[in-house]
Image (tube, coloured by chain):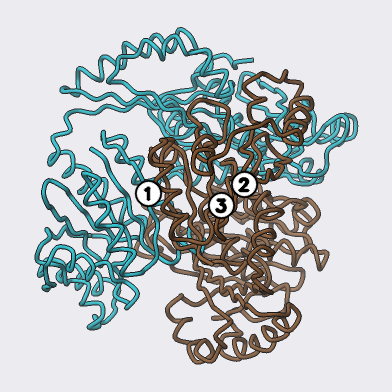
Chain colours: A cyan, B brown
Amino acid sequence: MNVTILNIGDELLIGQVVNTNASVMSQLLTSAGFRVVRVLTIGDNREDITAAVSDSLASCDITLLTGGLGPTKDDITKTVLCDLFQSELYENAEALANIERIFARRNYPLTPINRQQAWVPRACTMINNSLGTAPAMWFERDGHVLVSLPGVPFEMEHLMVHEIVPRLQRHFHTGAIVTKNILVQGIGESFLSDLIEPWELQLPQHISLAYLPQAGVVKLRLTSVGDNQETLRQEITTQLQGLYALAGKYIVGEDYESLPELAAATLADKNITLATAESCTGGTIASRLTAIAGASQWFKGGVVSYCNEVKHSALGVKEETLESYGAVSEQTAREMAEGVRSRLSADYAIATTGVAGPTGGTDENPVGTVWIAVASSSSTVVFCSHYGSRRQQNIDRAVNEALASLIRIVNNKPLPR
Amino acid sequence: MNVTILNIGDELLIGQVVNTNASVMSQLLTSAGFRVVRVLTIGDNREDITAAVSDSLASCDITLLTGGLGPTKDDITKTVLCDLFQSELYENAEALANIERIFARRNYPLTPINRQQAWVPRACTMINNSLGTAPAMWFERDGHVLVSLPGVPFEMEHLMVHEIVPRLQRHFHTGAIVTKNILVQGIGESFLSDLIEPWELQLPQHISLAYLPQAGVVKLRLTSVGDNQETLRQEITTQLQGLYALAGKYIVGEDYESLPELAAATLADKNITLATAESCTGGTIASRLTAIAGASQWFKGGVVSYCNEVKHSALGVKEETLESYGAVSEQTAREMAEGVRSRLSADYAIATTGVAGPTGGTDENPVGTVWIAVASSSSTVVFCSHYGSRRQQNIDRAVNEALASLIRIVNNKPLPR
């Protein structure tokens, strides 16, 4: 089943907004067994919308539209759809009740312009948007399905997950789909690809493998399509044995989208608390971890020790250590991790100290040099990594490598070095 | 001059990668006076690429392609362009020298497959890519310009900024362009729009205004097109007086893309040091500030005091304060800011404490309640804000409001409350 995604909005064409809707929708659709063949972004322009929708109706099985549903005059998707489906607008009672509920909760008066959002074409099935005022609209014609969605990212995603993808799966009888994420760290994408090639080549046709690399981590995503969910799941479990046999030492875990999520789940599951001491990563480990709801259960806190005084005063790194070995050293990383673990009374602690760049490198410690330490009650593991020249990439790689190391140490697995 | 952006790559269609290239390119082109009319993402598929390029050659003035230039068999952009421009590939000596230089620096042997990247169609002008091995290619036909760029984001951006946009401006004689960013905080987008409408309506035709909202901040971007850079700049300075007269109290500053960048420039400029004490923002203020190169000049460090013990032990918040008023209170925010300022010996300090959500709210402190404090040697300003129910949005808004308040206080301007 081929899909065209059509994102409408002038704000997307002037680069004001990054089109995250396209990737969220593509991911959800791909995981559900649909094939996105193109993503088109166009402005709030009647001719362009009409041409793009007509084109997609003729060439694809499914068209998903976002945007252009607001109450202002720029938002013309609805009237274009009326023309295309030779329909007219009517006030949908359920959509109106939803809008009234939302305005009542916010204590705003309902204006005639807001009320207009309850008007939908008669030709469509209205799908209620409980998080916002613009409903989704489902159209069918000659076997083709077109769905118009609001452009607000969290409203779109909620509707896609809970309404649109399940309805599409029922409508097109897509059968069972099982996906599995495996998080791999400590090996580059191309080396991983060479290493697991024999396994990849023997995978049955109905299991596809995608490489999703990001800052030193490769997420492998297996997608399996068939008749029975349970059979597919068992088959993937069996197949994974082959992957582990070849690349087990690089696998950090399964079933999560990112290392912060996997770290959060591991700590929560084992009832372990964590503290962080960050120099070159500047609070980014703490920020990524606390972005996860419920972090206060296992995250005690952290220190961002950007200058040497703070490494000494807030973390207890000895002045002699800083003088003899420098801030970017095994000894400093070790004392940072041990210091924050003891001062914040945490079970485990992570520390980072290095040269993020683009300047500040020396012969001894060029840009991209990062020391990482993980301390527990029994021992402290410290190692050095060498990344590249780009600041944000160096920060992101250090965050991921520190989290992967923490997860391995908590799980009593060796680091892949 | 109308532009089509064509992003090629299967990884974009399965949602593996967010298409940030599209927004970066759109922003650069819009600021340079070009009009992006559509962005199309398609897979590594010969027919789709051929159809999309032909379509764009017929309907636009400029086509910019990214992706499909790697050395693997999936990457077929180059052969499609050969067919379309009835040309053949040859080995370009400058491109080869660049590839050899990059491989020598990395100590990798140059394989025949890598060497293929130096092959370009005779019909194009090769534009060297100093950051990577795939060169850019500039084609012209009947007044239309088509440029093929590598898909790697930092290579693409570097080429766009330094080569492609300037060449397009010369080729199409776009004249002078001046853009100006104004960062506004403390007022919602729609209220701001109502407030400054009289000013917006009197702007001359050649000055356009864009609203770029993000987590409690609205970036206003003025773009002025004309003959003379200096005249345009003076005109914008004059026009800004009208904006300040209406909305001056909400304007935090000019000329930067974001509040972290403006804060960094303000602190560096005034030679002021900063420390942070973050509870609900979990290190995100520190992370955003230290993402900026050179942050060690003015950022001393911070404490992420996620649990109450750390607020007491690492920041010196009194146990009585936590007991009597609670962690989410004016008193705790004040003592956090004052504590971190004095312990880290900084000139200024920011503190945040609140309920990011989605759970943890109480009747007294519902989800979205955040106390923010800014401490200096002379005084501490503390206030409370109420955001919404979404965790990441609450964190982002608190970060922006804290930074806006810091900048205002450093500049001796009142907070807009």
Q: Do labels 2 and 3 share a chain?
A: yes
Residue highlighted by disc 2? B156
**x, y (%) of residue A142?**
11, 49
Image side of residue B267 versus residue B46, left or right: right
Placement of B152 over or under A157, stated as above or below: above
Is residue A279 at least partly visible in the picture?
Answer: no
The quarter of the picture where the N terminus of chain B appears is: bottom right
Placement of B267 over or under A346, stated as above or below: below
Q: Distance between the residues labelled 1 and 2?
A: 20 Å
Is residue B36 at least partly visible in the picture?
Answer: yes
Residue highlighted by disc 3? B146
**x, y (%) of residue A53?**
26, 57
Camera-nearest residue between B284 and B60: B60
Which residue: 75% across, 58% down? B342
Residue highlighted by disc 1? A39
Image side of residue A113 versus residue B357, left or right: left
Camera-nearest residue between B63 and A298: B63
**x, y (%) of residue A196?**
48, 13
Question: What SS does tag 2 mark?
Answer: helix
Camera-nearest residue between B283 and B101: B101
Q: Distance between the residues labelled 3 and 1?
A: 20 Å
Which of discs 3 and 1 lies nearer the camera? The answer is: 3
**x, y (%) of residue A310?**
77, 46
Residue type at mark 3: give it: Leu
